[in-house]
Image (spheres, coloured by chain):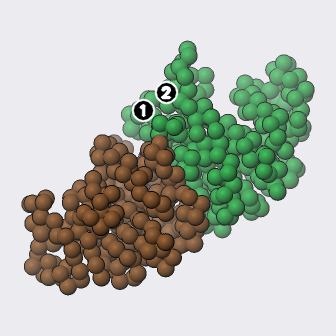
Chain colours: A green, B brown
Amino acid sequence: MNLILVKIGGNIIDNPDACAAFLQAFAQLPTPKILVHGGGKIATQTAAQLGIETNMVEGRRITDRPMLDVVTMVYGGLVNKNLVAQLQANGCNAIGLTGADGGIIRSVKRPVKTIDYGFVGDIEEVNASQLQSLLNSGLVPVIAPLTYSREGLLLNTNADTMASATAVALASTYSVNLVYCFEKKGVLSDPDDDEAVIDKLNPATYLEYKSTGVINKGMIPKLDNAFAALKSGVDRVTICHANDLLNAAIGDAGTVLTA
Amino acid sequence: MNLILVKIGGNIIDNPDACAAFLQAFAQLPTPKILVHGGGKIATQTAAQLGIETNMVEGRRITDRPMLDVVTMVYGGLVNKNLVAQLQANGCNAIGLTGADGGIIRSVKRPVKTIDYGFVGDIEEVNASQLQSLLNSGLVPVIAPLTYSREGLLLNTNADTMASATAVALASTYSVNLVYCFEKKGVLSDPDDDEAVIDKLNPATYLEYKSTGVINKGMIPKLDNAFAALKSGVDRVTICHANDLLNAAIGDAGTVLTA
């Protein structure tokens, strides 16, 4: 059976009109399907309003205790529940989850090496059978970028990684189509030309683009994740614009990655 | 089959030690079970920190758009997800839900009569079969005091009412034991004496206590709800201290209401 797992980036979530259009398209996809969402700028804005400083190291948020509360509120509450309510209004039986809910994604607090990222989780286990049981009852999981530890801590977790780990865990049961939606039309061969979409990437061409510096820094963790998912049994990975979801779902838009 | 539905009040949630002890007890109850939680003071505090004023009319929060975002963050995110993560650490397979998730509790925005309560929901329908399907797969729903409308609005909703409406909706399938836990040992015959617990209440004795003013104003909506639930097929309703949950679950603590 086919399963489509869509990751939607924070930039789309920050734009109400773009987000509404995306959700309308997502609601039209056949089930079983899963949505994993990023955080967006609302956490940073809310933290600032609460007088909590945002510290980023190499593009990653340092999550101290007050910031953990903010991301729990914003990702697990405000963003997740509004996505769910809008999907329900679009006839899609969404259920909002963090990794803690149903114990679907457990992690460990990242060990401190040179940098203390704080309450950040590295994924340990995805509970595929629990997810499958939700999917079987016709529900559409909408997953926020938070996981939990055995000790009952909530942990801020990278949404791209959650999407690929979930796709991999479900690949033994389903033919998984993993689609990363963001604000560009795909992986670009020229960062200044939004139309310069690379149609197809395989590990060899990816290496080449990386070595020549064509593929920029921000895309590398996402692509590394994506190729790892393909290697671990995920059928197809596509990186596309949120507006192109329906075409990308049938392999007809964005950058298609092959093993 | 028996089902226990526990409502936990905001005052317990506001106290981390009391809340942890309560969750440990709740985790020990047999399944199927459901937890419905109130909001607590964190929403008011968070709103104040964000510069949003809290307006209460007759003990009810006026929920304008900024306040709706705050309660969505706090009830649906911070409170709900921390309860879930703690229950998971206690070996209880909790899943945090608002009414929007799985479409379990739909409401309508309260019509404006003399007072405009804003984004507040009056419950229209509880989706018992969806809840039953979650319960059948071994999950323990943890329900935040938010519902949704057909239009995809999230709506702030009274947790006591959500608990009784859910208990009633499940009463055709289960023998439902509804337990309201709060910071007192039960319904008191003397508001200044915490030990003056009324062991049993039936509609006749309740009327008597109301007419003589023994039962105070704050308890009346809770008790009206509770008696209505008994009338609609709920087996037993108990009002007790959060510390007494395990005894109250077997009818051995608090105030037991009978039809």
On screen, residue A35 above or below B35: above
| Front-lying residue, A184 or A257 | A257
| Front-lying residue, A72 or A209 | A72
Sequence-earlier tag: 2 or 1: 1
Which quadrant is home to the C terminus of chain B?
A: bottom left
**Is any atom of residue A154 visible in this view?**
yes
Percent coordinates x, y for residue B218 in the rendering: 21, 67
Residue at mark 2: A118
Q: Of the residues shown, which amino acid type is indicated by label 1? A: Arg
Quarter of the view holding residue B66: bottom left
Percent coordinates x, y for residue B112 in the rendering: 38, 75
Q: Chain of mark 1?
A: A
Percent coordinates x, y for residue B153 in the rendering: 52, 64
Quarter of the view holding residue B189: bottom left
On screen, residue B61 above or below A216: below
Residue at mark 1: A65
Q: CA distance from mark 2 to mark 1?
A: 8 Å
Percent coordinates x, y for residue A35 in the rendering: 67, 51
On screen, residue A108 above or below B143: above
Q: Are marks 2 and 1 in contact (CB under 8 Å)?
A: yes
Q: Which mark is residue A46?
A: none
> The residue tagged with tag 2: helix, strand or loop?
loop
The residue positioned 54% from the left and 50% from the top of the image is A101
> Quick check: do tags 2 and 1 share a chain?
yes
Q: Of the residues shown, which amino acid type is indicated by label 2? A: Gly
The residue positioned 9% from the left and 79% from the top of the image is B212
